[in-house]
Amino acid sequence: MVDGQLVAELVEKYCTTRGYRYSYGTAGFRDDASRLDTVMFATGIIACLRSIALDGRPVGVMITASHNPASDNGVKIVEPDGSMLVQSWESTATDLANLLSSGSAEAIRQKIGQLASSGSGVRPRLVVGRDSRVSGPRLLQCLLGSASSLFQAQIRDYGLLTTPQLHYPTSRSLSMDRSVEEEDYFVDFSSAWNEITRLHDVEGLPCAGLVVDCANGVGGLKIHSFIPRCRVLSGTTTVINDNCSDAESLNRGCGADFVKTNQRLPTGIKETDGDSRLYCSFDGDADRVVFYYLNEDSKFQLLDGDRISALLAYFIAQLLEQSGLRSVLSMGVVQTAYANGSSTKYLQNQLNVPVTCAKTGVKHLHHEAVSNYDVGIYFEANGHGTVIFSDRFHDTVGSQTQDSLATKTLRLLPQLINQTVGDAISDMLAVLAVLSILKWSPSRWGKEFTDLPNLLNKVIVPDRSKFIATDQERRLTSPAGLQEKIDEAVSRFRSARSFVRASGTEDAVRVYAEAATQEEANELSAVVSRLVLESC
Ligand code: G16
C-alpha cells in the first residue's frame, strides 16, 4: 500500500519541472538539464519496477546526455543483461513522466500506487552512474527520491563512469560472488589486450603513435587509469581534450560527434601536426569512437563506424576461414540508413558478408545482431557499436581440437570487445589489435573502399514530432507529400540518396545526403533541407 501523503510530498519536492512533454527517445530521456527533475523521479520508479519484474535483478541507470551540449542531460536505463531497456517498457516510462509533469496530484498518487503495488515482496536493485555534467548530482537526487523513498531500493552508486562502464557491473553483478568494482572493468579489458598482443608478438603500433580525443568528457578521466595497464599503448598514446572538470568544454569543438558530423579535426590537433599517427575521438560518455588520420597532403581522412565494421568483418572472416569455421558459423553486419553506400557494397560484394539495415539507435542494431548471427557486427556510422558472439560461437570455437593462432584469436576477441554495448575504450582496443596484427597503417585501412561523398545536416523545425519515418527510417510518411519531393530531388543527382528523420536525442531533424561528388552531396543536402523547412 502506497502512502498517499508520502507520494504527495515527494512529488512536490522532486517533480519541480512541470508542463513539459517528454518522450523516451533513441537513447532514453534527453533534454535541457533544467527540465529533467521530474523525468529523473519517474525513471527511479520505472527502473525499480523493471528490477521487481525481473525478481530483483539489478537494473542500470546512467545519467548522461552523451554527445549533447553540456547544458543538456538525460538518462539511459539498462537491462540486467547489459542491453538497453526493453522497448515494451519505453511507453510506460514516457506516460509516467508525462503524468508527473502534468502535476495532477490525485492521478499521480493513483498511478504510483497501482504501479508500486505490482511489486510487493521484491526489493529492487539499481546500479547507478553518471557522466561529468554539473547537473548530474542534482538529477541523481531526484532519482533517489523515488527509488529510495518509495521502493527502498538497494542502490549501488558508482559515481562518475563512462556509459559502457555502467553496463559492465549491471550485467555482471549476479555472476560474481562479490561486488563488481570499476577495477574489474580495467583489469578485464587490459588483460585481454595484453594477451592478444602477446599472442601475436605485437611490439608496436603500425603507425607513429595514437592520439585520443576524449571530448572533455568522463572518458578522459578513465583513459588515464586504463592506458598505463596496456602494453605497447602506454608509451605510444597521447590523450587530449581530457579536461572533464571544465564543464562547459564538454563536446565543444571536439569528440566523436563533432568530428564525424563536421568531418574535421577536433580542437587540439592541427593539420600541420601531419604525421603518420592514428587519431581517435570518443563522445561525451565514451560509448562511441571514430578514427582518422592525416594523409600525405596533411588532409583529414575519417575512419568512422562503417570502417570499423568493415575492418572487423574482414579480420573475423579471415580467422573463421583459417579455423575452418566460415561455413559453420554465421557472420553478418548490421548498419543504419546513415551507412555510406560504398561500405555496404564492400561488405556484400568484396567480403561476401550479409548486411541488414536497422533503425537508428544501438538498441535496434543490437537486437538485429543478436537475433540473426553467430558473429553479429554492428556499428552506426557515428561510431556507436560492438560485436556480439553467440553461445553457439563459444561452443563451436571452444570445442575446436586444433589450437591454431586463428582459433586462439577467435577465443580472445569476445574478451577484448565489450559485448553489452558500444564502448569507445574496448572498440578502440579491438581496432588497434586488428591493425597491429594485420600490420595495416591507418592509410592502408582507409584504402579498402572509397566513401561516397556525403553530408549530414541538422534542421531546426517548430515541431519535429511531425516527421514520421518508415522503412528503417529511410522514408517519411509525414508531413504529407514531402517524401515525393525528396525523391524528385534525389533523381536529379548522380549516385544519390537522401533521407530525413527526426532526431531522438536533439530537438532537430536530421538530413542525410550522399552523391557522386561532394558538391552534389552539398547541393542535394541544401535542397532537401529547404524542402523540410517549407513543409513545416
Ligand atoms: C545515441 C544513440 C545512438 C544514436 C545517437 C543519435 O547516441 O545511442 O544509437 O545514433 O544517439 O541519435 P538521433 O539521431 O536519434 O539523435 P549517444 O552517443 O548520444 O547516446
Image (cartoon, rainbow, N blue to C red):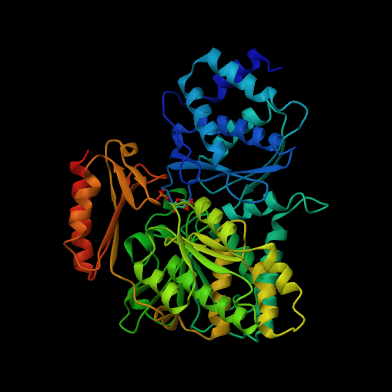
Residue depicted at 77% across the width and 49% down the height = 174
Of residues 102 and 452, the one drawn nearer to the viewer in this rendering: 452
Q: Residue at x 46, y 76 (%)?
A: 278
- One can see residue 401 in this view: yes
Q: Is residue 125 above or below residue 276?
A: above
Does residue 292 appear left or right of residue 139 in this picture?
left
The quadrant of the picture occupied by the N terminus is top right
Q: Quadrant of the C terminus?
A: top left
Drawn side of residue 452 relative to residue 95, left or right:
left
Query: In this view of the protein, can residue 245 be seen by the observer?
Result: no
Would you place residue 334 above or below residue 151 in this image?
below
State the image coordinates of residue 450 (x, y, percent, origin top left): 34, 76
Q: Is residue 371 above or below residue 406?
A: above
Taking 133 as reference, is 266 left or right? left
Question: Which picture quadrant has residue 194?
Answer: bottom right
Name the residue furthest right.
177
